[in-house]
Image: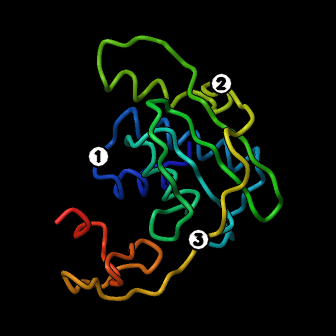
Amino acid sequence: METALWEKTALFHGHKCPGLAIGYQAALLAKEVLEIDDLIDDEDIVCLSETDACGVDAIQVILKATLGTGSLHINYLGKHAFNIYNRRNGKKARFVFCDSTQFSSKEEKLAYILSKEPKDLFLIKETISDFPQKARLYDAIPCAICGEQTAKNTLISKNGEQICKTCQNL
C-alpha cells in the first residue's frame, strides 16, 4: 500500500473507512490493468460508477475522474463496481468488489481490505457500456420565467419561450 496516496485520499474524503478502501484498491488495480500513468489528463480516464458511496472519492483522487470534468458518472445500481475507461489507449474494464468476508468492526474490515492485493478483491469483467462521450459544453441562457442562467440543452420551449426544468411545473 502506498501510504502517502492513501493518506491523501483519506484527507480528501474526510475519514478512513472500508468503502474508501474499496475505491482505493479498485483505482490501484485499474491503474495496473488499464495501464494508467500519473501523467493522465483529466478527460483521459472515465469512470461509470455503480455506487455513490465512499469509494467514488478514491476514484476521483487517484484516477482524476471527477464530476466537474464530466469524467465521472454515477449510475447507482447498489454495487461496489467501477467501469473504468482509458481513452488514451482504448482499454476498459469493470472492477467488481467480490470479497464477502464478514468482520466484527469497521476497523477490522478496513485493515483487511488495505492488507490485500487489489487483484484478490475484485472480479475484472467487461464494462456495462461502451466508451462514454467526452464532456459536452453548452451555452447558458436565462429562463424566461425565473431568469436563472440554464444550460441551453436542458430548456424546453413553452409558448415560444425557453423555460428551465424547475419552472416547467409552475
Using the image as rendered, state which of residue 44 and residue 20 is in the foreground: 44
Which badge, 2 or 3, is on the more N-terminal residue? 2
Using the image as rendered, state which of residue 52 and residue 142 is in the foreground: 142
**Label 2, label 3: how many angstroms apart (C-alpha)?**
33 Å
Residue 45 lies left or right of residue 14; in this view the side is right
**Label 1, label 3: how many angstroms apart (C-alpha)?**
30 Å
- Judging by the rendered image, the residue that carries numbered circle 1 is 15
Q: Position of residue 28 (x, y in %)?
A: 62, 45
Residue 144 lies left or right of residue 37; in this view the side is left
Q: Amino acid at mark 2?
A: Asp
Q: Secondary structure at mark 1?
A: loop
Q: Position of residue 42 (x, y in %)?
A: 60, 71
Point 43% across, 30% down: residue? 78
Q: Secondary structure at mark 2?
A: helix
Q: The N terminus is located in which quarter?
A: top right
Q: Is residue 27 above or below residue 131?
A: above
User: Residue 54 lies in what quarter of the image?
Assistant: top left
Using the image as rendered, state which of residue 25 and residue 161 is in the foreground: 161
Point 53% across, 80% down: residue? 137
- Judging by the rendered image, the residue that carries numbered circle 2 is 120
Q: Position of residue 26 (x, y in %)?
A: 58, 40
Which badge, 1 or 2, is on the more N-terminal residue? 1
